[in-house]
Image (cartoon, grey):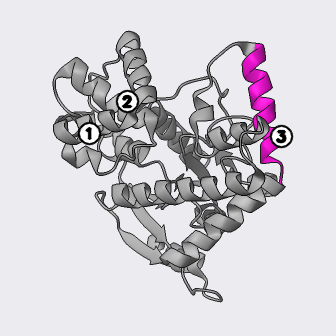
Amino acid sequence: MKKILTIIGPTAVGKTDLTVRIAENLNGEIIGLDSRQIYKYMNIGTAQPTNDDMKSINHHLIGCKEPWEPISAGKYAKMIIEKISEIQEREKVPIICGGAGLYFRAITKGIFSESYTDAGLRKELENKYKEDSMSLMLRLQSIDPEYAKIVHINNKKRLIRALEIFELTGFPPTKHFKNQKMNQSQLLDLYTVYLSLEKNVHINKINERTNYMVKMGWVDEVDYLLSLQKEKRLKMPALDSIGYKQVIEYINDDIDRETLIKTVVNKTKQYARSQDKWFKKEKIDLFVDLTNLEGFDVHKYICDIYSII
């Protein structure tokens, strides 16, 4: 069975555009690997593929869930597997593209079988996070120093989830990941390409993209989500995504436009660093630095290599 081509890398590195060109070359369809691009009404803020991209190439798991619907790594992995089968039945080439490290791990190594959760405990941890997030970070560092290295203190969801797992099972996340068991037929055999950029070039791209997102109507997009949240009276986990808190602060006149952009850029840089740390622990088949490759057909290079494996 042919390995599944997978394009990963940190946010704003250029995964989407390159993968569209690869899909055109390989007669492929693209499956998203992104915990936020899966939500509706967040096209701008999560940098979803454009309408033109999705007209030229079929995309899956992009803008298909309501923003109040939670999604776990296990469920996402099952959806990816289902989409791969559907695409292969049409005699097309499935191509996975995204930057969600936990979801990548779920399709390559599985997730621990007993996915414990407790609403009361989670609420307690959320309250503690509001009061003193650093104390929770120090707690994670003490019980699971390895996992703490790839969890940023601003990643509220992952930090709280890690501590919840420990409190309920007595074991830290790293131990669960090492002992995880999953039916081998549910794990994917991937050919993984990791994209990167030289640091300063990457920062410039993050800056340019953030300004573009605001210019294209990100504030209006968030304003609509807030009205939808009020109408539905439902908590939207999607609004925990990078930058959304700052856009809400801007809407409420708590910060100005310059502060909004500067803060979002900084948080995106932090997120990109955490993605890089995460993926360095995963099995990568091909590293491609996109810096100074103007005029070089990177998509053709990747397609040629993939065709002979």
Callout 2 crowding tier (Cα within 10 Å): few <14, some 14–19, many ≥20: many
**Image location of residue 95, percent across then percent down:** 54, 56
Q: Nearer the viewer, residue 101 or 89?
A: 101
Which label sits on residue 109? none
Side of 298 relative to 9 (left or right): right
Q: Which residue is mark 1?
A: 138
**Image location of residue 195, percent across then percent down:** 48, 69
Say what amino acid the circle numbered 3 marks.
Answer: Asp
- In percent of the image, x 31 and y 39: which residue is there? 137
Callout 1 crowding tier (Cα within 10 Å): few <14, some 14–19, many ≥20: some
Say what amino acid the circle numbered 2 marks.
Answer: Ile
Number of the front mark, 3 or 1: 1
Query: Which image quarter is the N terminus in?
Result: bottom left
Q: Which residue is mark 3?
A: 220
Q: Nearer the viewer, residue 147 or 85?
A: 147
Magenta-colored span: 216-231
Q: Which residue is mark 2?
A: 160
Q: Nearer the viewer, residue 146 or 77?
A: 146
Q: Main secondary structure of the magenta part?
A: helix
Instruction: Relative to 196, say whether 264 is above or below.
Output: above
Q: Is residue 6 visible?
A: no
Name which quarter of the figure residue 208 lies in: bottom right
